[in-house]
Each structure stands twice: as structure tokens, then as C-alpha cells.
Amino acid sequence: MSAIRSVFSEKKSAFIPYISLGDPTYEACVGWADALIRGGADILELGIPFSDPVADGPVIQKAFKRALANPFSMEIVLETTAKIHALHPHVPLVYLTYFNPIFSYGFEKFAAEAKISGIEGMIIPDLPYDTPETENLFFSLQKRGIDLIHLVTPATAPSRMKGIRDFASGFIYYVTSYGVTGERAALSSGLEERIRMTQSLFSLPVSAGFGISNPEQAKEISEYADGIIIGSAVQRIIEENSYNPDLCRKKLEEYALSISKSLRGHR
Amino acid sequence: MAKERSFTEKEGYFGDFGGRYAPEILTEALIELEETYLKLCKNKKFLKELEFYRKNYIGRPSPITFAERLTKAWGGARVWLKREDLNHTGAHKINNTIGQALIAKAMGKRRIIAETGAGQHGVATATVGAMFQFETAIFMGEEDLRRQKLNAIRMEMLGAKVIGVSSGTATLKDATSEAMRDWALNVSNTHYIVGSVIGPHPFPTIVRDFQRVIGDESKKQFKKANDKLPDAVVACVGGGSNAMGMFYGFLNDKKVKLYGVEAGGRGSAPGEHSATMLFGKTGFLHGTKTLVIQDDGGQVVPAHSVSAGLDYPGVGPEHAFLHSSGRVKYETVSDQGALDAFMEVCRIEGIIPALETAHAFRFAKDLAKELGKKKDILLCLSGRGDKDVAEVARLVGLYQGAEF
């Protein structure tokens, strides 16, 4: 069983927060990651900045813009990842990235070095399962024990989910609502039914993300989802508080605690 | 249309380029679009309706004009112009928006959205929005709104909502990203009218099929007038829709040399040009695999051109393929070269061309000399330059201080 799969259990729902690497500096991100893990993160998603993040809303777009004000290189991304991994080696790290930076770096090289840095999974929102690159990447990652985590959305037909199955591992990222990433007051109707249907089609845990921001929402969804992914709400805390790193870490840890305690079967 | 599907195309790919690399939330809509389009291509009623609007609304066929005075001034090959500037709304963009509006209608969508750089695609989309009574939203970079105010006003007058985009470089690239985000949110009731031969499959194919009328007509018209084919065909390339439409009629005629002209901007440094063929590397942008101007880390580099319609850091995937196969040669013309050609064409031929097309004119001037007399160049005059007069006047120092 992969390191990611072993996080999920039938008794509790996993908490999976997200941060954009490099916002506002790569060094500072190590502190944000540490705080989130101390607050109860079971898996941590690390966003690799990209100039044209079409699946992301304003909060993460702005985070990437701030990150790209620093010189960007895959080397610094991998180094920062390794530092986070060294602090908490038992917490699986997952990259969330657009495909172009990986393709540009060479994905064989990337996969090998990501594994060494401590990466256990990859999420690539602009790489659908039915492309030649997915097949190559999936097997390249698989031989190194890295999971390729796919997105399933309210618009994904069951026939398409069956296609995704052949190239999916780790967990399924269920997109709770139409649109891009960002906090939302209300979640889409029929969510429980869709997530249960997704669970029945995949022999993988299903984590829900996009639009979840507060403990009440997290608690409600954790009753049926295997994990809760929160990106924009975490990133907003960083946006508002990174001028004071100590305060920012404190707020991130408190927020993470509030979410992790709200989840089904919390520790 | 699709009955003669491209020999360059296989399942949404053109050689190694193309494909569908869009967020999962859009994939079902792209599949629905592809299926609907394939059915409509064979539907006589749809084709008849398209033909009706081409003739009675766009004003097709657009003529080809012998540019007698330019030919004389340049002292070389004969120069012929395919007059897309004479279409309703003043550019080739309407060929595509009429077609896609009919698809949107067939799919039962109530809302259309588009991205625009120079604004011609925005105006063409706003026009069909009014014509077919769609709710219409147009995404336009703040920098382009400044440069192309006239077109933004035209869009508003036509009833469209113009949404300024301030993220990123505030130009076409970011307007495209924002349109994709809107589509992801409203995909159930909205059709995204992509304006060039870019984006995820099936957009590059659909846009090309609606634009190939330019090349098909040109070929017939030129043959009828000259009893031969032109020796060279020239068109400007940003995303590449007018060029793709023009070239498509001649791809199989190996003796006809095809030239695409990109924006060389101010220089060769990153951020100073939009010369994707010269400086781009294979990459993934806005849902397609194509040549992209990017840095060593795979980050997309902002493009520059004096023409808001050309400053896109990618290019249509079919162009990337035609470049790699060598069938089309891609050249560059600088901002200054385009401005010089703009003024020259105005004064010699009595035509105000779009700044985009001015790049093609500047290249054609050299080509005319190179080819020499008794040869023929056919140039796609993709649009008229009314939208550019204020910006050109500012740049060349005409009417300084005047308010436009």
C-alpha cells in the first residue's frame, strides 16, 4: 500500500491542506508547512507556481504571482520540498502542478528527483487521463511508487470515470463544485450522492476539494468523504499574515487544528 | 467543411501538436462540442443556414483586389489582396463567430463568452450575440482595453458585457485564462467562442473549418482571374486563424509557397516579441500542446507586439505542425516595420489595414522584390485598421495631444 493510501482509514477522514510554494518566499513556506502539519494535516499539497493557472481562482492566482516574483526553478521547488519532508518524514507530500513546468524539466528526471525530495503523489489539473503524456507519466511515477491523483468533477460522466481508473492511484480528488478553486458559502447539491457514486466506481479513497473553507463545511462533508482538501482558505491566511511569519504560523496551526478536529473520527 | 477533414489531423492532433489538455471540469463540454459539431457538419439545414449568413450577413464572398499601386511602388511581384476587411464588422473574425453561434444555438446554450486582444473577435462575438440574442460577455486585458478603446465601446453598444482582466500581463493571454475560468463555472449554459485556432480539441479544428472559406474562395477567385495559382500566399499570425483559413485552401498545392508572419516586436529578448515559431518551445498552454514562448523553468513569458492582436505567447497547434513539417515558412516583422507598412499601405493603396495585417504587408514588400516581376503574391488582408488609428497616430506622432 502506498504511503498515501495508508493515511486513509474507514474511521476517520483525512485533512489535506494546500500551500503555494514560494509565497512569499521558499524559505517561509517551510514554516507554513510545519504549522499545518502540527495542526493535524495528514497529507500536505504543495503547489508548484505556474504563470497561467487556468483551474485556479483569484487567491491562488495571486499566490503564484507573488511566488513568481522570486526566481523560479525546479531545483528550488525540490529543495524546499526536501526541507519540509525532513521535518515531518511521515506526512506524505503531494505536488499540485500544471503540466508545462514538469514537461519542460523532463518528467522522467522530475519523477526521480521528486521521489528523492519526499514526494508521494502528483495532481495535475490540466493533464486529463486520456492523453499520451498521462500514460507515460503514470508508469514513470508508478515505478517509483509515486501516485498519480486524478480529478473527478460534477461534470464527469461515469463512463469517463471508468477510463480514469486505469491511470489513477493514491486517492481521487473530487471537485465539489463547478468553476475554479476558491472559498464558497454554499456547496453544490447532491454532493453526498456524487461522492458515494465515485467511491463505488473506484477502489480508491475519495477526497473532496474546491470551495471548502470552514470547520462546519469540513465536518459535514467528512461524514461521507474520505478526505477534505482545503487550498484557498489556507492560502488566504498566508496572504493576510505572511508579513509577520510568527503570527502567520500560529494562525495556520490554529486553523488546521480547527479543521482537523471537526473531521469525522478526529484524533 | 468537415467532409474534407485535414490530412494533418488525427484525433485532435496535428502531428505531435494539439490534443485536449483542459481541466477535467471542461472535458465533457469539449466532448459534447465535438460530437455536436461532427453532426452539424453533415446536417444540410445547418450548412444552408451557415451559407445564408455568410452571404447575407457577412457579405461573402469577399473580393480579391489587385493592388496595382503597391505592385508598382514595390517594383516586383504582382500583389493581390484577399479583402477580409470588407466583411461585416471589418475582419475575418466574423466567419468563425457566426459558425460557432450557430453551434451554440444548436446546443441550446443561452450565453456566449469570448476572449479578445485587439477586440475584433470581441466585436464579432458581440455582433452574433446581438444577432442571435445571447447573453454575451467578453474578456479583455486592461492593457488592450486602453489600446483598443473603440472596439470595447463597439462591444458595449452591441449589448455585450466587457470584463477587464487585470491579472498577469493584462493582455490576451490573461483574457484567455479568465474566459476559461468563466467557462468552468458556467459550462452548463455557456458556450465559449474561442477566437483563434488555439485551445483544446476541437477548437483548433472548428475555427479552422469556419475560416477555411478564406482560402477556398481565394483559390477559386485567383484561378478565375489569372488562370493559375499565386506563387506565394502571405498572412499574419498571432494565434493564427486568418492564416490557417487562408493556407488551408493551398496546402496541397505544393508549388504555392506559404508564409506566416509573426510579430518581431522590439527585439529578440524575452518579453520583447511574439515570435513563437522562432523562439517558442513545445509546451502546454490554454488546453493545447503547441509551441509556447517560455523560460527555462516552463513559465510562459509575456509576449509583446505593437498590435494587440498578435501578442500571444503561443500559436495554433496546426501551425506548429506546419512549421515542423516545413510546409509553411514563418517569418517576423518588427513593430517599426509594421508601422511603416501601415502608413505606406494607407497612402499608396487607399486602404487602412489592421496593424496585424501590416506585418504581412511589410514582409510581402521584401518578398515581392525577391520573387520579381511576373510572379504573384496573394496576401490575406485580415481586417481593417480603424481600431488602430489612435494608437498608430500616437506612435507615429500624428495629431499629438488630440483626444480620440
Image (cartoon, coloured by chain):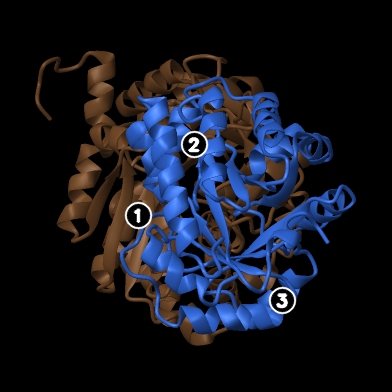
Circle 1 is placed at which residue position? Answer: B87
The chain painted brown is B
Circle 3 is placed at which residue position? Answer: A202
Q: Residue furthest front?
A: A267
Nearer to us: label 1 or label 3 = 3
Q: Residue at x 20, y 50 (%)?
A: B154
**Between marks 1 and 3, how big is the CA–CA gap?**
53 Å
Q: Are marks 1 and 3 on the same chain?
A: no
Q: Residues within 10 Å of mark 3 (few under 14, many from 20)?
A: some
Residue B404 falls in which quadrant of the image? top left
Q: Which chain contains the residue that carries disc 3?
A: A
Q: Nearer the viewer, residue B391 or A76?
A: A76
Element under label 3?
A: loop
Circle 2 is placed at which residue position? Answer: B312
Chain A tint in image: blue
Q: Position of residue A118 (x, y in %)?
A: 75, 39
